Amino acid sequence: MTLRAGLIGCGRIGFGFQQDVQRVGIASHAGAYAALDGLALQAVADPDLATAKRCATLFGAPDCRVFRDPAEMLATTELDVISIASPDELHAGHLDESLKVPQLRGVLLEKPLALSTGVAESLLSRIAACGIPVLVNYSRRFCSAHQAVRQAIISGELGEIRTVTGFYGKGLRHNGTHWLDLARWFFGELAVHEVRQSHARPFGVDATPDVILSAASGLLLHLHAADDRDYTLFEMDIVGTHGRVRVLDGGLNIEWYRVEASPYFSGYQQLVRWQTVSGLRDSLLHAVANLRDAVTQGAAPLCSADDAAQALRLACQAAAYLPVASEGA
Ligand SMILES: NC(=O)c1ccc[n+]([C@@H]2O[C@H](COP(=O)([O-])OP(=O)(O)OC[C@H]3O[C@@H](n4cnc5c(N)ncnc54)[C@H](O)[C@@H]3O)[C@@H](O)[C@H]2O)c1
């Protein structure tokens, strides 16, 4: 049976990235629904009606319906699954409205889950009461190259992890939660250890500080802020006793290093890069496939609303350390 899908928000990740000639693979929600078996995009909603119509024409089923107002779409169209790709501040409301649809079987929500921990907690209660899978698109979790990094950390292939550093920009909740979620997925539960104001501009009221986190093992993770006006910078550098992994270019590229005898100095060991792999290709294809499989086969969501709430909790805790705490703390 084909799952009937609806899309709220037809912007860049809703469908526009699919038209960017520099992007390779499936990079939008609409593109993923069009590419996968067992799903069909039956309705889209966006106040920008021209964009919504273009999205429906390019990626929707032949009878795909187009709405300005998501509430009207939810009230008048029979949908099994919904993607929410509206701006950050609308996610909680759109998820809440979607969960009221009686026959709904699953949701894929863009990050962040919400903008405050209080709202996130009430959404988690609503989700638990509905009993349907709600996935959040912290995209790296859906990609096998990032899953391989996690496996190398957990299996001990990288040895004991000595240090983790990284960069992010554009607000702790907006983009920082991508890093916090990745770190929590790789290294387990984290606590905020120290926070410092940085040179990087906030994303609206969402501060962009430097943050030091601690893992239960005592490992410290140093997250540095980067000002997005200069360029985009998102990296994670994991240094272990047996090797090193660098998540670069937002995760598009992952460099792997191993320890070898130095060709330059007798008796020394050094790190040698032995492979660079593509890390994010088709991330939305994998996310929507995970949604489909969660709904039809009971597959475990690779990134749950609970995971997203934990990343948001860390972001809000860190923001609360700052002299003028941003909203949501
Ligand atoms: N997971 C990722 O890697 C990733 C990447 C990019 C964006 N995002 C997230 O996706 C979301 C959208 O980002 P974007 O870059 O596509 O933004 P965008 O501004 O390009 O798109 C947002 C769209 O939502 C529409 N919209 C506004 N109000 C609406 C409403 N009430 N109902 C329905 N649609 C409405 C806008 O008209 C616009 O078309 C953001 O929350 C962002 O954080 C996630």
Image (cartoon, rainbow, N blue to C red):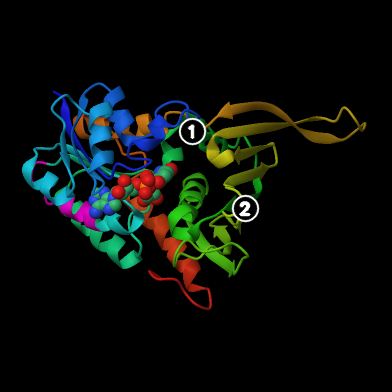
Q: x%, y% of residue 41?
A: 21, 31
Q: Is residue 52 above or below residue 23?
A: below
**Within-10-Å neighbours for mark 2: few <14, some 14–19, many 20+:** few
- Camera-nearest residue between 295 and 154: 295
Image position of 238 (left or right of 97): right
Image position of 101 (left or right of 118): left
Q: Amino acid at mark 1?
A: Leu
Res. 294 in view: no
Magenta stretch containing residue 135, yes or no?
no
Magenta stretch containing residue 100, yes or no?
yes
Q: x%, y% of residue 256?
A: 65, 32
**Within-10-Å neighbours for mark 1: few <14, some 14–19, many 20+:** many
Res. 202 in view: yes
- Asked if disc 1 and disc 2 are in contact, CB closer than 8 Å, the reply is no
Q: Which tag, 1 or 2, sits closer to the chain's start?
A: 2
Residue 230 is marked as 2
Q: Residue 259 falls in which quadrant of the image?
A: top right
Magenta residue span: 93-103
Residue projecting furthest to the front: 50
- Camera-nearest residue between 143 and 115: 115
How far, Cα to Cα, is label 1 from label 2? 23 Å
Q: Amino acid at mark 2?
A: Asp
**Secondary structure category for the residue under label 1:** loop
Residue 154 is marked as none
Q: Quadrant of the C terminus?
A: bottom left
Give the residue at mark 1. 280
- Camera-nearest residue between 156 and 176: 176
Count of numbered circles in the view: 2
Q: Residue 8 falls in which quadrant of the image?
A: top left
